[in-house]
Image (cartoon, grey):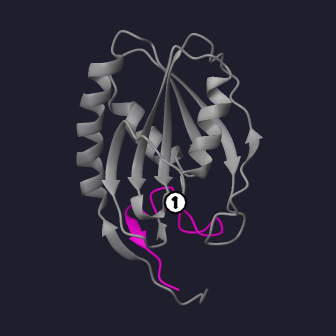
Amino acid sequence: MSSQAEPKVLISQQEIAARIIQLSSEITSAYRDKNPLLIGILKGSFVFMADLVRVLDFPLEVDFIGLSSYGAGKESSGKVRVRRSPGSEVRGRHVLVVEDIVDSGLTLAFLKDYLLEKKPASLKLCALTDKPERHRVPVNIDYLGFTVPNKFLVGYGLDWNEKYRNLPDICVLDA
């Protein structure tokens, strides 16, 4: 990838903030009395999850899981590995996974199996973005921010080789 590539805004920070408010309303309706455990997938979900939990006005707990399938490339390797396990008890809890982007679906399929083995009361997914044409396995997204084109995205927590996470907008990074 050329170091001269300039990210181009696809979804502005204002659009993201407005959509998070809408998602929080949907999530509140489902979880208000359930004290859910929100599990963010590191590293990409941390910005989205931070903004989301700040607008949820009910008791909840937050934890994280570290999964890896990309390395330094722009394509998923297809092999998912756990780099950091959640420290919270999942058994009997209402779990909401928070993800930055759904691409092939392989990471989420792996995570779903991983978490279901721990016997949660329920398991749902909230994703900021989805690239449905890239799915290699079926993915059920319960709360979705945006459907996005099959482009490489950065910003708002999304990265390329650990760069661009700090951009306030979701941007397309052209090679």
Task: Check disc 1 and report its element: helix, strand or loop.
Answer: loop
Q: Is 112 on the left or on the right of 100, as rendered?
A: right
Residue at 70 percent across and 24 percent down: it is 87
In the image, residue 117 sits, relative to residue 138, either above or below, namely: above
Residue 148 position within the rendered picture, expressed as x and y whole percent measured from the top left: 35, 63
Residue at 29 percent across and 63 percent down: it is 12
Asked if one can make out residue 59 in the rendered structure from this viewpoint, the answer is yes
Task: Work out whether residue 96 or residue 15 is closer to the camera in this orientation and state it.
Answer: 96
Task: Work out whether residue 37 or residue 54 is closer to the camera in this orientation and state it.
Answer: 37
In the image, residue 9 sits, relative to residue 20, either above or below, namely: below
Dot 1 amino acid type: Leu
In the image, residue 60 sits, relative to residue 25, either above or below, namely: above
In the image, residue 169 sits, relative to residue 91, either above or below, namely: below
Q: Is 154 on the left or on the right of 142, as rendered?
A: right
Residue at 55 percent across and 38 percent down: it is 40
- Magenta region: which residues? 155-175
Query: What secondary structure prevails in the magenta region?
Result: loop
Q: Is 28 on the left or on the right of 153, as rendered?
A: left
Specify whether residue 61 is painted magenta.
no
Residue 28 position within the rendered picture, expressed as x and y whole percent measured from the top left: 30, 23
Residue at 47 percent across and 77 percent down: it is 173
Residue 56, quarter of the rendered image:
top left
Residue designated by label 1: 158
